Amino acid sequence: MHAPSASPQLIARVEPLTLTRAVRGPFDYRLRPEQSDIGVGALLRVPFGRRTTLGVVLELATDSELALDRLAEPDAVLPPGVPADLVALAGWIAEQYCSTPARALTLVLPPGAAGGARPKRVLVAELTDAGAQALGDGTTLTDRQRAALQALERDGPVVAATLGTPTLRRLETRGLVRVESSTRARRPASVSIGRRLDAAPELTAEQRSALDPVLGAIAAGSGSAGRFLLHGVTGSGKTEVYLRAVQETLAAGRGAIVLVPEIALTPQTVGRFQARFGDVVAVLHSGLGRGERHDEWLRLRSGEARVCVGPRSAVFAPLDDIGLIVVDEEHDSSYKHEGDPRYDARTVAVRRAEQHDAVLVAGSATPRPESVAALRRLRLSERIDQRPLPPVEVLDMRGVHHSLHPRTRMALADVRSASGKAIVLLNRRGWSNFLSCRGCGNAWMCPNCDVALVLHRARDLLSCHHCGHRRRVPARCEECGSVAVARHGAGTESVEQELLEAFGGELPVFRLDADVAAGKDRLAQTLAAFEAARAGVLLGTQMVAKGHDFDGVTLGVVLDADQTLRFPDFRAEERTFALVTQLAGRVGRGEDKGPPARVLVQTLAPTAGSLTLAARHDSDGFLEAELARRRALGYPPFGSLIRIVCSSPDASEAVAVAGRLYGLIAPAGETVLGPAPLFRLRGRSRSQLVIKCRDRQAAVLAVGAAVDECAADAGRRGVSVSVDVDPQ
Ligand code: ADP
Ligand code: ZN
Ligand code: ZN
């Protein structure tokens, strides 16, 4: 067949945005001559089989394996599309996390474009020359039409709905007005609008020496040398170092991304960036409306905003020249995405920095061993106000049959007499851990998951923390009829009651956990109320140890600190150490009030290394021991883990698919553990494989190929397969 030779780029290779693993593009489409401006990353609506779908252009080409006249043409182009560097990044993510190009592309689409929704647009009407003439030359017009034309003549273009869209449409058919769809700018509330920008403080000597190499790397615009870990205790001024690095990046004419764990828990950090740099800062997060997110995205895409602050998804901010990526609180597990692709924003940040030749700065008081091994470490060893970190005391709870140790009670009583503040952390929400019958031993389990239901007394229900199943609290045992029901373990709800009983209204309790935080505003309100209160206890799950700077907290308490250690997970030590250290960082800041600052750690495992090292504020000691342990066991950073979970309503089908995957992957030479049963979740039985690999790249490719090969068969058997590279 003879292709016309006029246009050099006639074919677009398009990845359809479908979730099915079995469908894998790209597919070729023929572009019309007037579509020659379609480039890589353009978002198209294309015919696909008997329906249409959205697709992203991966590549342009001049020829196709198929005859040109057999190729379909796109139905529509949906601007603004995806920047080309993000298309490349999505391809990398699909491969590295054993996902599909289509799923990875959904991560980088403009907000609102996924799922087929167009970016929100409005109709705008404008007077034509003929329309202006019609007002003067006696053309027949209804009163309403005349009024509309006069308004357009007076006010210029307006949103059509304000003058009546049907009226304008009729005028449009007569050529008297033009009606076009256009985007309208929506801005989230910004603290900086109309406000003087904050001045930068004089840096301390420590900050200066930490910042110098970062500034050097920014000035050099170099890639590989510019990978830093800012390891500094809480309150040591890390954020100020990020701010200076961003300032320098902007001065060099480039953009910056600042990743924070969760916006709701870190509003202070976001506010500091806006206060320093004003409107050049855009914020992207899920708390914004879809329209706001879309418009912030466009501000970044157009270059109007050059700094993006946001949680993990902000790593995909559409900046076209990135000079710096900051990852604040880099130890935080929220950087890992829990849906497919299960990407880790910290790893993606490194890749994106490579793409743009940008400098990377990760910071934490409790950095991950992986980061210590991979990045150049810069230290901030003292708090800005020179205050020492509070002493930490480990309390042995063996033989203590209350949720509060006697010393904890005394310390809280001291806080009460001084009208001070305390933070109490218990990583378990609800009233009690589980219920059992004293008569027959029956325990109340979730019907969908093999786990115990948790008592929530305030709402009078038992609930499953995995699938959300809930039921009324039983008055008697359904097995034997006994009314003697025992409650085991304490949760935030019962500790709240206990604190109120012990200390009364003089020490109000502010509870913060997922039950409270279900409403986004409640979370911010609770934090603000605790901040404003004269005295009180902030009680909650790990959320209470994240990101917040409260003045005047003199006591921190961790209840059941080894709870995190009981998880069968190689990160248990790291998590426990971080929890205690982060809480200690929140204690003893700001103005002096109440008794001397201190931290109490209640535990059944008082000799656990992660606790004793945290008690000594010895993060170097901890990291050294942890790296040695991981080296011996081949855990990250000395090897990688990949987890595959097969789940199905039918246990034997899940095991069968896991077995088949084992057979495909094991010969590639990596250690494959399993198939091992996991507890049933949401009515699905699960079977797990864990691959411990030395050669990560080879293992990722082998797993990706094996999962693709099994996809169709697994689908027929009703088995879903999920792959997690670098599981948390
Ligand atoms: P981190 O991020 O390490 O927890 P911050 O950057 O929040 O620490 O700093 C703690 C406090 O010290 C903040 O209130 C900050 O405004 C203040 N601060 C930081 N650097 C300086 C400085 N060089 N001079 C005066 N105050 C500073
Ligand atoms: Zn019973
Ligand atoms: Zn459940």
Image (cartoon, grey):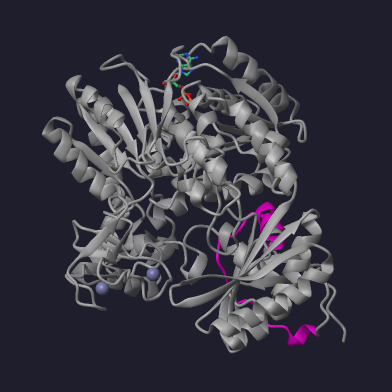
Residue 80 highlighted magenta (yes or no): yes
Q: Residue furthest left?
A: 505
Name which quarter of the figure residue 170 lies in: bottom left
**Image side of residue 396 versus residue 615, left or right:** left
Q: Position of residue 459 (x, y in %)?
A: 19, 60
Picture layout, residue 653 above or below residue 492:
below
Q: Residue furthest right?
A: 2
> Quick one: quadrant of the N terminus?
bottom right
Tell which of 81 and 372 is nearer to you.
372
Residue at the image position 50 percent from the left and 20 percent from the top: 236
Residue at the image position 18 percent from the left and 31 percent from the top: 507
**Image side of residue 126 versus residue 486, left or right:** right
Q: How many marks?
A: 0
Name which quarter of the figure residue 264 lies in: top left
Residue 602 highlighted magenta (yes or no): no
Q: Position of residue 419 (x, y in %)?
A: 19, 22
Picture layout, residue 595 above or below residue 133:
above
Residue at the image position 71 percent from the left and 53 percent from the top: 640
Tell which of 406 and 6 is nearer to you.
406
Q: In this orientation, does residue 587 appear?
A: no
Q: Which residues are magenta?
A: 67-95
Q: In this orientation, does residue 299 appear?
A: yes
Q: Position of residue 17 (x, y in %)?
A: 60, 72
Residue at the image position 35 percent from the left and 26 percent from the top: 195
Tell which of 424 and 483 is nearer to you.
483
Q: Position of residue 579 (x, y in %)?
A: 46, 38
